[in-house]
Image (spheres, grey):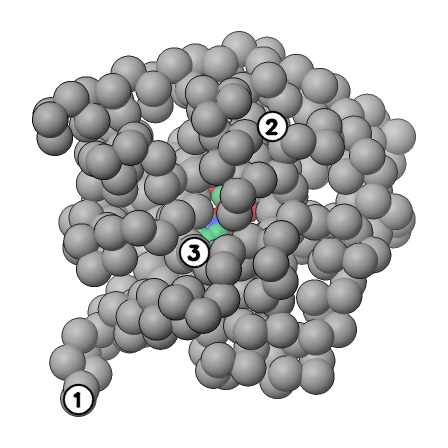
Amino acid sequence: MEQLIRRAQSSGSLLCVGLDPVGTSETEVAARLHGVVLQTAEFAAAFKPNLAFFLARPDGVTLLQRLREWIPADVPMILDGKFGDIANTADRYAAFAYDVIGADGVTVNPYMGDDAILPFARPDKAVFVLAKTSNKPAHSWQDEELVRGGTVSDFSADVVQQLSSEHSGLGLVVGATNSEALAHLRQRCPELWFLVPGVGAQGGDLAATVRAGCRPSDGLGLLINTSRSIWQAVDPGAAARDLTQQINALRTERVSDAV
Ligand SMILES: O=c1ccn([C@@H]2O[C@H](COP(=O)(O)O)[C@@H](O)[C@H]2O)c(=O)[nH]1
């Protein structure tokens, strides 16, 4: 998380460039992937490859390892695997993500409990735990009210908040498609970093996202991901630059409103 904060500050960006490579030819996909990294790196607070898009290719693991080499060392790479299994299996997923691929962070599905999360917690790694996801049907599970009070997504956020007093580097995944839920979780967890997918192809409102999720104290705390709208752009560098500028204008407003 410290690496992420340093990078967000040095790049002046909260943009997370999502990498969900599609295409039929392995050579062309690798070249496009490399090109997107080269063109967007200066605007990227982080990159987020989604594991599924690599596993679906014949040499996906090798491509992920090459990707880590293409991404500049000071830019964190978050492997979006939504891992979630019992502790000894989670430990193997962590070894894959960190030691085999060289990822600096991961996403984790907390459904199985704390032992699905904690094997990923290492002092120098970021772990983003699903709290409120961006997909439309998410509400039918995550908005369920619990007997103890609060919703399932509140529970996930509370557990992560509690665990973060003992384990560094924990954050939440909160979608950009429901800015009320984002504002609610920001109030509940004022300091945690949120990885926020859903801007772009999924229609999340960028301005509402920054207003709801950015920490007013320092203008940080959010990593705003977009994948298809950069991958499919004619000029990925220009798309990343434009988004970064829009995010920065909005977060400046957010911080000055709070003063
Ligand atoms: O709640 C979530 C969690 C993860 N994702 C992932 O983020 C990207 C979004 O891609 P777009 O093309 O910008 O829609 C993708 O890898 C998802 O699996 C998410 O969308 N929502």
The residue shown at (33%, 60%) is: 132
The location of residue 104, given as percent across then percent down, is 65, 48
Given this view, does label 3 or label 1 mark the residue nearer the observer?
3
**Cβ of disc 3 within 8 Å of ligand 1?**
no
Given this view, does label 2 or label 3 mark the residue nearer the observer?
3
The residue shown at (45%, 70%) is: 166
Measured along the vertical axis of the image, is residue 238 above or below residue 34?
Answer: above
Pointer 3 with pointer 1, Cβ within 8 A: no
Q: Secondary structure at mark 2?
A: helix
Judge by depth and name the residue closer to the eye, 82 or 32: 82
Measured along the vertical axis of the image, is residue 199 above or below residue 242?
Answer: below
Image disc number at residue 95: none
C-alpha separation, residue under disc 3 versus residue under disc 1: 25 Å
Q: Which residue is mark 3?
A: 171
> Can see residue 59?
yes
Q: Quadrant of residue 248?
A: top left
Circle 2 residues within 10 Å: few <14, some 14–19, many ≥20: many
Return the disc, 2 or 3, that comes first in the chain's sequence: 3
Q: Amino acid at mark 3?
A: Gly
Pointer 2 with pointer 1, Cβ within 8 A: no
Direction from residue 219 to residue 111 in the image, left or right: right
Q: Which residue is mark 2?
A: 231
Image disc number at residue 147: 1
Q: Quadrant of residue 151?
A: bottom left
